[in-house]
Image (cartoon, rainbow, N blue to C red):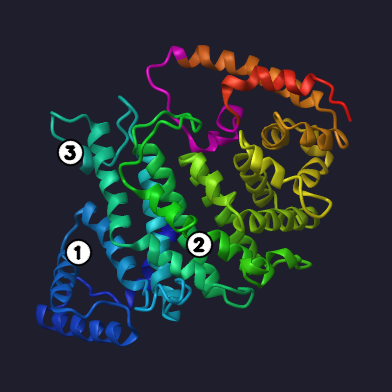
């Protein structure tokens, strides 16, 4: 973690004002720095905004306040990501190329690390693991959990209110071709998606909702999920399609994958899939609605098909697992999306999942990754079940559900003896977080039943 922070800080160092400069030199440097930004179109030139920027600049570098540090990250990102005046006319597909230089990427990298620290510091009940300074400032009238959650909700709301989501969407939509020979753009995309993933996880942790991802009664007071939905997942799906197929979603019907992808492209795809899965955990109906929309669903199917093919030719276990999990979230309890994974050119997405290496049907660790997705894609869909049975026996899925039910009952008895249940984000591999527990028995019966072919 320290290495990441040093790397990000190094990219910022040549544009920052160090603490030991005199006020006169500092003011001159700030003025010259702002003139440089104005010439590049990176900041508002209004007097009021300039005074506010100067105040923030001074207070940040002469303060050790942790909260101001987080606000400063959001402020820099909001200022650096330039959106042109003709944003509506260009459908948001124009971005200043300087955005993809090291400064913005370094800020995004630091923000991703800070968000990771905050996620690991989320307090649960009596488990007060949040930052010491935050706890020190808590008032006796408010519990540490409530105070911590309120501060984090304010932080997430601030990110949305400064328009960062819309500006990042503009950047993602501006990428409409390969990034094989553009490491700076690839680094920007990786760190931007990592920061968005951290915001999704943090938003899930502090919104005071049920830990079940299938609980649709929750509300998001930060407005973060609304912002992501309004921008079609910040344009990440569109960007991913373009870098994989070197074209736009409008040409999705003629898409054909490359023979192989370079490491930069694979890393961007991995971070993008992690963002999709984190958003699915945060708001599953919104994720299914966005990705299942006309046009985007076709692009999603092509992306998954292409990545599954790549993973069959190269060793990319982390990427393969994220793809498998994402298909599960896409199809669970959603008949229309179940149809999408069994349509198109053969082998279809569903067929490719059923044709994965033998280890995914014999190794308990890999079975835990694949089988919940097959259950989600085929439950209550006789046609998908027939396709599945051409490659494997559906009784295997029924047995998996039965075994998981027994193990889950034992785990529940252990948890009932504990006062608090701490949700870990790696728990999304568990069947309960990928297929609703209340339908386990019905699903088991469905996969035991013989279908008429």
Whole-number angstrom distance, CA of label 3 to CA of label 1 = 21 Å
Residue 427 relative to residue 343: left or right: left
* Of 209 and 368, the residue lying toward us: 209
Please state the horizontal and vertical placement of residue 309, each as a whole percent of the image: 77, 56
> Foreground residue, 271 or 66?
271
Residue 40 percent location from the top left of the image = 34, 85
Which callout, 3 or 2, points at the residue further toward the start of the chain? 3
> In the visual, does 160 lie left or right of 292?
left
Q: Based on the displayed image, in which of its 4 quarters is residue 186 positioned? A: bottom right
- The residue depicted at 76 percent of the width and 43 percent of the height is 350
Quarter occupied by the C terminus:
top right
> Is residue 249 inside the magenta stretch?
no
Residue drawn where x is 37% and y is 74% of the image: 83
Which is in the foreground here, disc 3 or disc 2? 2
Q: Which residue is mark 1?
A: 60
The label on residue 136 is: 3
Residue projecting furthest to the left = 24
Q: CA distance from mark 1 to mark 2?
A: 32 Å
Residue named by callout 2 = 235
- Looking at the figure, which quarter contains the N terminus? bottom left
Above or below — where is 345 with respect to 281? below
Front residue of 8 and 39: 39
Q: Are marks 1 and 2 in contact (CB under 8 Å)?
A: no
Q: Which residues are magenta?
A: 416-434
């Amino acid at each position: 973690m320290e290495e990441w922070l040093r790397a990000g800080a190094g990219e910022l160092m040549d544009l920052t004002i160090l603490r030991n400069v005199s006020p006169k030199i500092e003011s001159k440097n700030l003025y010259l720095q702002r003139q440089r930004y104005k010439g590049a179109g990176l900041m508002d030139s209004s007097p009021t905004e300039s005074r506010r920027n100067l105040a923030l600049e001074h207070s940040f570098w002469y303060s050790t306040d942790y909260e101001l540090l987080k606000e400063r990250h959001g402020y820099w990102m909001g200022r650096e990501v330039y959106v042109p005046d003709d944003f509506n006319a260009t459908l948001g597909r124009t971005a200043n190329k300087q955005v993809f230089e090291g400064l913005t990427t370094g800020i995004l990298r630091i923000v991703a690390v800070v968000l990771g620290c905050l996620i690991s510091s989320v307090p649960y009940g009596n488990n007060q693991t949040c930052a010491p300074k935050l706890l020190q400032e808590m008032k006796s009238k408010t519990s540490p959990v409530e105070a911590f959650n309120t501060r984090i909700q304010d932080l997430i709301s601030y990110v949305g209110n400064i328009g960062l989501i819309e500006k990042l969407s503009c950047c993602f939509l501006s990428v409409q071709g390969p990034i094989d020979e553009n490491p700076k753009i690839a680094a920007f995309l990786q760190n931007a998606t990592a920061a968005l993933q951290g915001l999704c996880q943090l938003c899930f942790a502090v919104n005071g909702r049920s830990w079940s991802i299938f609980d649709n009664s929750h509300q998001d007071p930060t407005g973060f999920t609304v912002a992501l939905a309004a921008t079609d997942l910040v344009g990440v799906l569109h960007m991913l399609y373009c870098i994989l197929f070197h074209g736009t979603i409008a040409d999705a019907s003629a898409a054909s994958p490359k023979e192989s992808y370079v490491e930069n492209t694979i890393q961007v795809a991995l971070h993008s899939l992690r963002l999709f899965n984190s958003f699915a955990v945060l708001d599953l109906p919104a994720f299914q609605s966005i990705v299942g929309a006309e046009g985007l669903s076709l692009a999603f199917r092509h992306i998954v098909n292409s990545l599954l093919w790549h993973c069959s030719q190269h060793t990319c276990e982390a990427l393969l697992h994220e793809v498998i999990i994402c298909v599960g979230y896409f199809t669970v309890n959603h008949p229309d999306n179940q149809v999408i994974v069994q349509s198109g050119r053969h082998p279809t997405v569903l067929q490719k999942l059923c044709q994965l290496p033998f280890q995914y049907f014999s190794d308990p660790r890999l079975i835990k990754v694949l089988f919940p997705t097959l259950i989600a894609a085929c439950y209550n869909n006789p046609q998908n079940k027939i396709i599945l049975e051409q490659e494997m026996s559906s009784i295997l899925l029924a047995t998996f559900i039965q075994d998981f039910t027994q193990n889950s009952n034992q785990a529940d008895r252990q948890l009932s003896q504990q006062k608090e249940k701490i949700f870990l984000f790696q728990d999304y591999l568990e069947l309960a977080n990928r297929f609703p527990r209340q339908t386990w028995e019905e699903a088991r019966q469905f996969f035991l039943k013989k279908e008429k072919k």
